[in-house]
Image (cartoon, rainbow, N blue to C red):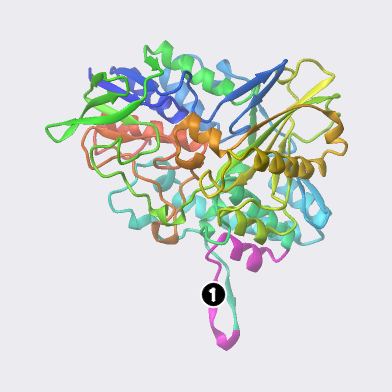
Amino acid sequence: MARIAVIGAGTGAMAAAARLSVAGHRVTVYERSETYGGSLGRYARDGFVFDTGPGLLHLPAVYRDLFVKTGKESLEQCVTLTQVDPASRHLFGDGTEVSLPNASRAGVVRALDRALGEGAGARWGDFLDRAGTAWDRSRRPLLEEPLPDDPRMLSRDPYPAVRRRRLLRTARQAATVAEVGAWELADPRLAALLDGYALSYGLDPRRAPAAAALLPYMEETFGTWYVAGGMRALADAVYERCLARKVEFVFGAEAVRVSEKDGRAAGVELADGRSVEADHVVLGAQPSPGLMPVPAPVPGGAHRAPVPGRFVVLLSLRGAREAGAAHRTLVHAVDPGAEQEAVFGGRTAELPTVTVLRPDDPATRPDEDHEAVTLTATVAPHGPVDWTDAALRERFADVVIGRAAEAMPGLRERILHTEVRTPAETAAGTGAEGGSVPAPALAGAEGAYLPAGNRTPLPGLYLAGGWAHPGGGTAHAGMSGALVAGLVVEGDGFRGSQ
């Protein structure tokens, strides 16, 4: 039985902890804050309850596998999952509107044809077919296996872009999300739909490789799910599973350095002066030079810094949620290019894309005569933008609410209370530099969008969570926990679950 110290209590770190404890190891989690869950936070006031991070779950199979491998109770015995239908409603800059059904390719094609004109659905369907090919080509090495020491096999874009003839008989293929939208989808609204997927994950459509097509493919193929009570309920369930497996948690314990002895990780030094010995250390937070005794890994996408964060507005509303209201609505930017220039140029966008979440869940509101609504925009991180500036926060929150009001007429008149969360709060709560939110791993672009691998140059030190392979997002973080546990238990020969 090995002693294992886990730094951080995010979902990826807890997933690793539960699996390692089941394997017979003694696991202790050290968390700088007073609670668990990482980005899966919760805010409550006067009977209103909100998620402060992700509000929906994709690829629930990741957590189904975790619960199968760590106990008798399945995921569905611990939380209530429902498919969101429609999966999303979209309001485009020209006033066009479309609602897309959940996990129904034929339904999406029909909906797009009705809203955008005959042929739009077929173009989107053909695009998803190509995205499916990219998924088949890259799923296992990109998501289910540890990142190889030589990641060149993932440097080539798996998306089979359509070759297009140009002048002088030359041919080109779309290399970025923006080029796929312009060249293959051939409709600014379909392009905005694709851009919206990329932007919601913190990716710049102008630079992200065409392989980002995997993101809408995953959502539209495997569905979008809501966890009753909010995503925090998933964090609660993972935490309870860790406790059931005898994982120990120490809160208010900030790790300041991973200790080293005889050329391998030997434990953790805490801010209060304590030193904890361990045979293995799992770092579930953003790697930093001060924390690691070896050079912090530089992921392939370091040139893309600064990585965006999220601006969140939590609204307590008077008045009942109307019947048939969409759970998720995206109000797309009128000028996507201007928004991308601002977000990835360290400025605030004048008219950002805003995601409106309206869960039909009694657990989120005091009674049926009120509603809890969450608004989210992808924004530049804290640093390039001073998100502690009270006037800026208030002004941008007003812009975000105004955009949401396009999807919810009369919104302003219903507001009882507004709570604003910016990248500054994310940085303070999670320790992520600038409050940045990591994006999922992507193949292509010469490996520029691959995060740090789960193994490190220091034997005995492993990386889990959104800043490690296979990247950010609740599902990807859970995958990282499975990969780290496999490497610790089986050694460097581990090649992923079969």
Q: Nearer the viewer, residue 420 or 174?
A: 420
How crowded pointer 1 is (Cα within 10 Å; few <14, some 14-19, many 20+) is rated as: few
Q: Range of the magenta residues?
A: 167-187
* Residue 355 appearing in the image: no
Residue 173 inside the magenta-drawn segment? yes
Provide the residue designation for mark 1.
172
Give the percent coordinates (x, y) of residue 253: 37, 20
- Residue 324 x/y as whole percent: 84, 32
Is residue 187 left or right of 265 when viewed as pictured?
A: right
What's the residue at 26%, 25% (across, down)? Answer: 269
Instruction: Say which quadrant the C terminus sits in.
Output: top left
Compare residues 30 and 16 and report the one nearer the observer: 30
The residue lying at 26 percent from left, 18 percent from top is 274
- Image spot of residue 202 (x, y percent): 55, 48
Residue sitting farthest toward the bottom = 168
Judged from the image, the secondary structure of the residue bearing numbered disc 1 is: strand
Report the number of numbered marks.
Answer: 1
Q: Where is residue 88, by image quadrant?
A: top right
Q: Against 300, is 119 above or below?
A: below
Residue visible at 51% across and 56% down? Answer: 211
Q: Is residue 41 visible?
A: yes
Q: Amino acid at mark 1?
A: Arg
The x and y percentages for residue 110 are 78, 51
Occupied quadrant, residue 335: bottom right
Residue 179: say if magenta: yes
